[in-house]
Amino acid sequence: MGDSNQKEFRVGMIGYGFMGRAHSQAWRNVNAAFPTPRIHMESIVGRDADAVARAAAQLGWHRSHTDWREVVADPSIDIIDICTPGDSHAEIAIAALEAGKHVIVEKPLANSMEESRAMVAAAQSAAAKGIMSAVNFNYRRVPALMLAKRLIDDGRVGEVLHIRGAYLQDWLSDPNLPMSWRLVKERAGTGVLGDLGAHVVDLMRHLAGKDVEGVTGHLRTFTHQRPDGSGGHGTVTVDDAALATLALTGGAVANLDVTRNAPGRKNELSLSIFGTKGSIMFNLENLNELWMFDREDPAGEQGYRRILVTESAHPYLSAWWPDGHIIGWEHTFTHQFFEFLTSIENGTPASPSFDDGHAVQAVIEAIAASAENGHVLTAPEE
Amino acid sequence: MGDSNQKEFRVGMIGYGFMGRAHSQAWRNVNAAFPTPRIHMESIVGRDADAVARAAAQLGWHRSHTDWREVVADPSIDIIDICTPGDSHAEIAIAALEAGKHVIVEKPLANSMEESRAMVAAAQSAAAKGIMSAVNFNYRRVPALMLAKRLIDDGRVGEVLHIRGAYLQDWLSDPNLPMSWRLVKERAGTGVLGDLGAHVVDLMRHLAGKDVEGVTGHLRTFTHQRPDGSGGHGTVTVDDAALATLALTGGAVANLDVTRNAPGRKNELSLSIFGTKGSIMFNLENLNELWMFDREDPAGEQGYRRILVTESAHPYLSAWWPDGHIIGWEHTFTHQFFEFLTSIENGTPASPSFDDGHAVQAVIEAIAASAENGHVLTAPEE
Amino acid sequence: MGDSNQKEFRVGMIGYGFMGRAHSQAWRNVNAAFPTPRIHMESIVGRDADAVARAAAQLGWHRSHTDWREVVADPSIDIIDICTPGDSHAEIAIAALEAGKHVIVEKPLANSMEESRAMVAAAQSAAAKGIMSAVNFNYRRVPALMLAKRLIDDGRVGEVLHIRGAYLQDWLSDPNLPMSWRLVKERAGTGVLGDLGAHVVDLMRHLAGKDVEGVTGHLRTFTHQRPDGSGGHGTVTVDDAALATLALTGGAVANLDVTRNAPGRKNELSLSIFGTKGSIMFNLENLNELWMFDREDPAGEQGYRRILVTESAHPYLSAWWPDGHIIGWEHTFTHQFFEFLTSIENGTPASPSFDDGHAVQAVIEAIAASAENGHVLTAPEE
Amino acid sequence: MGDSNQKEFRVGMIGYGFMGRAHSQAWRNVNAAFPTPRIHMESIVGRDADAVARAAAQLGWHRSHTDWREVVADPSIDIIDICTPGDSHAEIAIAALEAGKHVIVEKPLANSMEESRAMVAAAQSAAAKGIMSAVNFNYRRVPALMLAKRLIDDGRVGEVLHIRGAYLQDWLSDPNLPMSWRLVKERAGTGVLGDLGAHVVDLMRHLAGKDVEGVTGHLRTFTHQRPDGSGGHGTVTVDDAALATLALTGGAVANLDVTRNAPGRKNELSLSIFGTKGSIMFNLENLNELWMFDREDPAGEQGYRRILVTESAHPYLSAWWPDGHIIGWEHTFTHQFFEFLTSIENGTPASPSFDDGHAVQAVIEAIAASAENGHVLTAPEE
């Protein structure tokens, strides 16, 4: 399968849970949508030999392994894709970069700034040798948000003044949902803040082209005890909801609101970006749509425009289906991998970079620190 | 017109600007929708004799006056309706209550807690003599929000955990819009925070039945100079945007985001109320709709339900038109006045009370104080 | 109340049911929104003397009467407003026009073309004497549809090719809802076709500026027996649903679908108008919104624009509230009466005219005739 | 790749245009989502040897061919997937069935009833030998419409009375779009009627479980001449828009409206299904949503419920991503192929069957015949 004269990048993927399935879907389809650069799905790594062999067969990988070091050391491998939990990202990524592999890491880049700082250093050394690295903030590659970025960069909303960002899910509304590692601080770092909040912070920085200069944070845990699956209970040690205010470069301000306890909001990553000349709205539950308001439309005809971002004039869409035929969540991974491959082939820096991942981590930790300092409360007088 | 045996409450209204027009619309129509208690539109007060006489003719008032003290002293007047700017509310309201008139005051109750505290005291003294007082947080009387209150009180969303409240307008997006008293701290107290934020804070307290225990606030002014209308410029001394986090009784949390610089959002007072069993959404731009999500609906059939709140089963609607025939913004005033009249007739306390107005003022001032203390900024480390 | 030097048109209204309440609301408020021409709510007519006296008191009329002829003969009356059931429209309207009164008739103009033809003749004779007549297709006066008309007339959608029009309600979904005169052919003429379909046909003709050249119709009655309220049953003899295809002037085509059995659609009068350059969407359940698509917007930025028709740049809105403060269904009557008064004052023909009412009646009857001829069915071969 | 003990069905696909790409996407991913029955992408067929070889490489097929007969004759092939234009469907499908291959045909089944009748006969003969056949009305496999079918079958909307079905696109709005075979009657049979209308008719029959007993049709061509790409013009000989009324079994009625000239409607296949107890709405542009109204919800809480059909409780979704992570248009093919494979493995009849395809063709032809007979026009009298 393929043109034998053409270079194929051989991919090794570490981890095969939910994210491993999503990444495999993207690797499996990237060359049908974007014929070059070509890849080969070579190796998949997991700890259980039988399970990972079954996953390889189902997901389309050529070989399976139980030790990631084997794959990192394999000279036939060009790209390492890291889908493991966050606490192992730094070790694997640094080893792979040192072995001369291009590396893409699922977000968040790491569980701590100490780790992410080391990863940034490794990425810089690797870059000097033409080795690329990226963190998979895949929502940058939603076509509607690619369009949003283009519109903002073209000045269509003017100077960005105010961003409202939220990521609302509801899977923790059920108090009987059992404990998992995601609810334990030692494993997960933070709760919803680092998991969903990281996406929103990355998009705010990316879309507005602004840095975060200061934050206030407020974290809440609504359900403190959950069944541990063996008749007892475990203690939730991370945040269920996180609210923050962000001061952005140039006097702009942002509102962040993330929760896993919003009944009915299944996967609402919503953004409103208000500028001096117009504004933009987005909601991940309808990821094929972008809404734009232009203050320069004729008086009496102004209104939010629902752009169905499915046309060949839109980013990535000429690779897919005719106008109006929507794509799904998984396509954001395909687009991100295509961008990463193109960077490798062209020798241009990949994006989002480890620097981006580190900057987001810094904001997350500042929010958590602000919340801990408890200076949130000014009591109304009587 | 009317049954001569029936008591008519004679109303005197102070002020006749935008709010005076809206109040007049409500007084003019209240008895067509709700035949009793009956009112008579007696006196309107403004400073310019000719202008107020024209307003009386146009809006349906029997007499016009230039001195509010005349009307407050008039023994034939039963009710004083105060629509003047906030800095005169306390003086007029206290005088009217002392003269034995029932008093309804446009929101915000006052421009400072000092004033609102005095008003509460006057209201308490008056109440002892059967004299009623209310502050016109009219959005409590949107039928959809009356329904929301009923659903929450009936336990349909469970324990309220998290509220997202915003009030977004865009009329200050135009940098050439001239100065007005609303943009001057001495006259207006605060900017968008006290004007629009007050509505949201009132609704959060009212709908969730919770008090605000602590706040963090962050205010921004985006446009500092505006044309003064005579070739020069004036300085804006109030906030264009206000963001706050609120800690509510019982561990709940709320997010407040208000601005006059959100291009395309004309009058979006939006609320999402997340509880343990369900949630509720509302947007004032579609004020005839309430959205509800019920976690107890059958699996596979759960979803936000768009309730078109226009049926005779809904609050106030049997007084209006058949199912699906929507009402407008002005009807909220009609409903509030009907409630106020009913309280007077029945001798039951009116709502929202001056206490409510004072409590909202306390939250607004706490937010402003938090913002001034500048403890919002925790800088992300590098 | 009012300027004594200024002419006031004295109105007499015949009928005081649901439509009488809506008309009264409009007469009561028209001069608050539109100060001139001025009116006076003089006389209301109903058959039950006590009930109509109570209605007069509640709705704001000066006098009540039990015989419409009295009011038609009263020299002090300038305008006759007819809100009775359709079978009396012709007699009253013709008498009033002959008596030199300006006449506005609730839609449909009449129950038969024989009647509507006579009314057109009377209107023509009256017009020669400066006497105005109009039929109250009030939805022409929804600001969003006034804007739609302006956009279409300005060529913003190009040549109109195709219209989708529907009016969907659900109040007959309940099989236990009792019989009423509306369900009896002798009284109501047709069912949903003449009641709701007439509005849609009028809007199609009006907005597109096109005549109906041919039709196909298909009528259905789903519930044939209903409780008669005294333990027995009555027979429904009109249509519950009507579907039609219309051929319009210039090769355009239209689809008409009206029903009272669409659960969940409370008052959905929806229109989509497709032209060569763009299109327009409207739904009466959100009557403050118009959606427009412009094929000439830049590639990649095209989308339906939700125009919140509440700005001072929009028709009638400067008479009401600030941007984003929505109006209700009743305001369409106020606007229509203002237009009618302006026509009278200026001596210009009123619109919609009796000619319009007659043309709509002709289409309704053609659809009913087509349905009766039964030529709807071409059976698919096996 | 895969378990060597497990049977793999070897697929040969005829045609590789737009539909070939979509089918390949589905074959490439079906076993990642649904591990069994397993398939192998063996052969792809096209007329241009180089182009089809490139397509094979890009889309993931093992071998390419230029003669479909070769693949039909190949004993290693189990399944023939036909994506060619409609005029070749009958010949290929009948040959393949006779060769003992399972056959799935892209819709429409054929261009004429003569062809579809022969295909039905071939399918019946093949079925007797355990050979399966299906027509790819893929929208039956939208999870939201699978849910709709389940709800209707469970009686949740009661007896279906009235269906509104439309399929609106806008790619012919541009008068400069050049001619193509789709606009020529000899090649395409009909225009939008057979292309988009066929989907709607199939869904109406399928979802309501009702047959079409009679029709009225009305076809329009708005643009008669189009550039032929070589400086001249060609003549459009098919319909741009088709409107029809359908009488369904049991007294129900349906409205069909399809066009390629609806500016702004990119791919709106919309359905409203009204029953005695509730109703359902769907729009393909938001294919992850189903809206349901239940007349048995408590009074005051009734409303259309937006079900985001992305949960593991919903059809097919447990094979994909977590709640709220939407899927795209292409997944409908994956689901349909999974169903077809399951039928083959289990020896149960596949659906939609050739009978379904033939029945739809009969309705399409009846509509076209009705339109030609011109009995659409009943002229309104003057």
Image (cartoon, coloured by chain):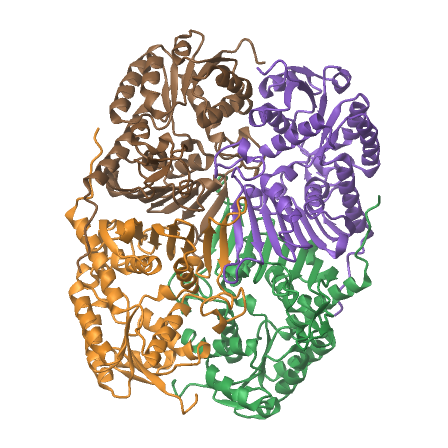
Chain colours: A green, B purple, C brown, D orange
User: Which residue is at the front of the view, C356 or A317?
Assistant: C356
- Closer to the camera in the image, C8 or A181: A181
Q: How many marks?
A: 0
Residue B285, image quadrant: top right
Which quadrant would residue D357 be assigned to in this image? bottom left
State the image coordinates of residue D325 (x, y, percent, origin top left).
Answer: 52, 66
Q: In the image shown, does C296 or A31 lie closer to the viewer? A: A31
For the N terminus of chain A, the image quarter is bottom left
Residue D218 versus residue A202 in the image, above or below? above
* C334 lies left or right of B363: left
- Pinpoint residue D27: horizontal percent, then vertical percent: 38, 77
- Residue C99 is drawn in which quadrant? top left
In the displayed structure, A302 sits above or below A156; it is above
Seen in the picture, residue A80 relative to D332 is either above or below; the reply is below
Q: Is residue B332 left or right of residue D159?
A: right
Q: Can you give x and y, in whole percent of width and height, for residue A315 in the image? A: 47, 64
Where is residue C227 shown, x and y percent of the image? 39, 37
Q: Is residue A333 visible?
A: yes
Q: On the picture, is C142 further left or further right than B166? A: left
Does residue A162 show up?
A: no
Q: Quadrant of the C terminus of chain A?
A: top right
**Residue at the limit of the structure toward the front, as seen here:** C231
Q: Outermost residue, top direction?
A: C75
